[in-house]
C-alpha cells in the first residue's frame, strides 16, 4: 500500500478549487495508482465501488471518464465521495497504527 498516494489525495481534497476539481485531481493523480490487492477487504470493496462510481460516464469530448462523471455531480455528491475517501484513509490508518488511535 502506498501511504504517499493516500496522503497526497487527502491533501488534494482539502486544497484549493471546486470540490469536483479536487475530487478529480485526488483520484486521477493519486488514488488511481493504489494497488487494491494490498488493501484490507473492507477498504478494497469501498475502493472498488468508488472507482466504479467515479468512472460511470464514459470519456467525452476531451474529458476522461472520471472528469466526465465527477463534473456531472452536484457539490453534495462530490463531498460524499470525498468523505468516503477520508473514511477509507482512516480505516487504513487505524489498522496500520492501532496504538495511535484515540491518542
Image (tube, rainbow, N blue to C red):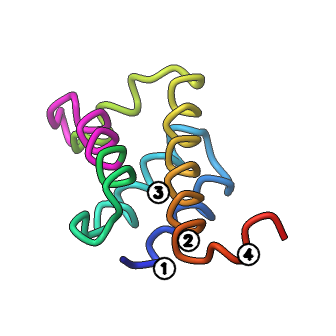
Q: Are marks 3 and 2 in contact (CB under 8 Å)?
A: no
Residue 44 image label: none
Q: CA distance from mark 3 to mark 2?
A: 10 Å
Q: Quadrant of residue 39?
A: bottom left
Q: Is residue 18 above or below residue 33?
A: above
Q: Are marks 2 and 1 in contact (CB under 8 Å)?
A: yes
Q: Which mark lies nearer to you, 3 or 2?
A: 2
In the rendered image, residue 22 lying in the magenta stretch gets the answer no
Question: Mark 3 or mark 1: which comes first in sequence?
Answer: 1
Question: Mark 3 or mark 4: which comes first in sequence?
Answer: 3
Name of the residue lying farthest toward the right: 103
In the rendered image, residue 51 lying in the magenta stretch gets the answer yes
Residue 7 image label: 2
Residue 5 drawn at (x, y percent): 44, 72
* Residue toward you, 54 or 15: 54
Label 4 belongs to which residue?
100
Neighbourhood count class around disc 1 (C-alpha, 10 Å): few under 14, some 14–19, many 20 upward: few
Q: Residue at x 47, y 57 (%)?
A: 26
Q: Which mark lies nearer to you, 2 or 4?
A: 4
Q: Quadrant of residue 83?
A: top right
Q: CA distance from mark 2 to mark 1?
A: 5 Å
Q: Which mark lies nearer to you, 3 or 1?
A: 1
Label 3 belongs to which residue?
26
Neighbourhood count class around disc 2 (C-alpha, 10 Å): few under 14, some 14–19, many 20 upward: some
Amino acid at each position: 500500500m502506498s501511504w504517499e498516494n493516500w496522503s497526497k489525495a487527502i491533501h488534494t481534497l482539502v486544497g484549493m478549487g471546486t470540490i469536483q476539481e479536487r475530487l478529480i485531481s485526488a483520484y486521477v493523480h493519486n488514488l488511481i495508482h493504489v494497488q487494491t490487492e494490498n488493501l484490507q477487504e473492507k477498504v478494497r470493496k469501498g475502493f472498488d465501488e468508488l472507482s466504479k462510481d467515479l468512472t460511470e460516464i464514459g470519456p467525452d469530448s476531451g474529458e476522461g471518464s472520471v472528469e466526465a462523471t465527477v463534473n456531472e455531480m452536484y457539490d453534495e455528491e462530490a463531498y460524499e465521495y470525498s468523505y468516503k475517501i477520508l473514511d477509507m484513509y482512516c480505516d487504513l490508518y487505524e489498522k496500520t497504527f492501532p496504538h495511535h488511535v484515540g491518542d
